[in-house]
Image (cartoon, rainbow, N blue to C red):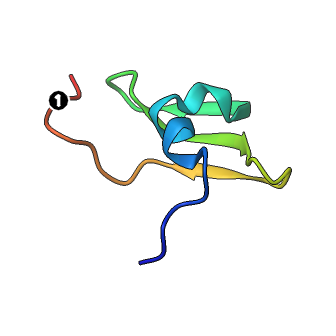
Amino acid sequence: MPPLPPGLVQLAKNPDTLIAGAVTVDGSDQVISAAVLWPDGSRGTLTITSRGPWVL
């Protein structure tokens, strides 16, 4: 796997910096998807497919 471009690891630690629209949550009020604006200026959707055990 190639290394991540600079800054993406930091963005992953603080995804709020990417949110650019609607956020969908589940019954536990956990985010499951969100409209985002990626660092290259393109729009997309962030989809949460799994969570680590540290998420309450």
Q: Nearer the viewer, residue 26 or 56?
A: 56
Q: Is residue 50 above or below residue 56?
A: below
Q: Is residue 22 toward the left or the right of residue 5 in the image?
A: right
Q: Residue shown at 41%/32% (left/top)?
A: 26
Q: Residue furthest left?
A: 53
**Is disc 1 placed on a helix, strand or loop?**
loop
Q: Nearer the viewer, residue 53 or 33?
A: 53
Quadrant where the N terminus is found in the figure: bottom left
Residue type at mark 1? Trp
Quadrant where the C terminus is found in the figure: top left
Q: Counting other residues with Cα less than 10 Å from the Cα at mark 1, is it few (<14), some (14-19), or many (20 or more)?
A: few
Q: Residue shown at 86%/50% (left/top)?
A: 41
Residue 45 drawn at (x, y percent):
65, 51
Residue 42 drawn at (x, y percent):
83, 55
Residue 38 drawn at (x, y percent):
73, 48
Q: Is residue 15 toward the left or the right of residue 45 in the image?
A: left
Residue that badge 1 annotates: 54
Kindly indicate the quadrant of the structure image that contains residue 11.
Answer: top right
Q: Is residue 38 toward the left or the right of residue 2 in the image?
A: right
Q: Residue shown at 57%/48% (left/top)?
A: 8
Q: Is residue 13 above or below residue 6?
A: above
Q: Residue furthest bottom?
A: 1
